[in-house]
Amino acid sequence: MIGRTRWQTLLSVVLLSGSLTYLVARWWNGQGGQPWPVSPLVTVMLLAFAVVLYSLGRSVRRFVLGRRPPMDPLHAFRIFVLAKASALAGAVQLGFFTAQLLVVLEAPDSAGARAQAWADGAAAAACLILIGVALLVEWFCRVPPVEPEKNHPEGAAA
């Protein structure tokens, strides 16, 4: 059985991804390389994916609460797995963009470095939003415990 994503797992992924990215980026800059550019489109796409994921999760939540017609359990499970994968992918990207931001902030002050820092910071914030939405959708997909049915009158043998 697949369980919900734990915050310790996400923190470990962020730290591992961030550490590796920081080491490689520092080495790359030491060799004379420029920081890796981050397009503003990355932030937009991460936020758009968070909106789509939320809408998918909301449909499952309405089904669980009984406000929607029957849903295929496999469809609901796929949305749960998508949310779990999104949380982990968001954690990897959060580590990546945060490490890049730190490396850029260490660089000499220039207009290009400031623009790069804003782009990295915006992408990291979008990753945080994606992780939050993914964890919320995982919670949406939780099914309440089933109460045992009482088919037999009190005192009757089962």
Image (cartoon, rainbow, N blue to C red):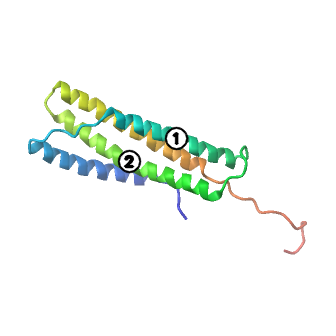
* 130 sits left or right of 17 in the view: right
Residue found farthest to the top: 111
Residue 37 image-quadrant placement = top left
Residue at the spot x=60%, y=47% of the render? 140
Q: Amino acid at mark 2?
A: Ala
Q: Judge the density around disc 2: few (<14), some (14-19), many (≥20) Cα neighbours within 10 Å.
A: many
Element assignment for label 1: helix
Q: Label 2: which residue? A: 91
Residue 7 in view in this figure: no
In the rendered image, residue 130, in percent from the top left (x then y), is placed at: 45, 41
Residues under numbered marks 1 and 2 in contact, where contact means CB atoms less than 8 Å apart: no
Q: Is residue 118 shown above or below 93?
A: above
Q: Judge the density around disc 1: few (<14), some (14-19), many (≥20) Cα neighbours within 10 Å.
A: few
Mark drawn on residue 52: 1
* 156 sits left or right of 10 in the view: right
The answer to which of marks 1 and 2 sits earlier in the sequence is 1
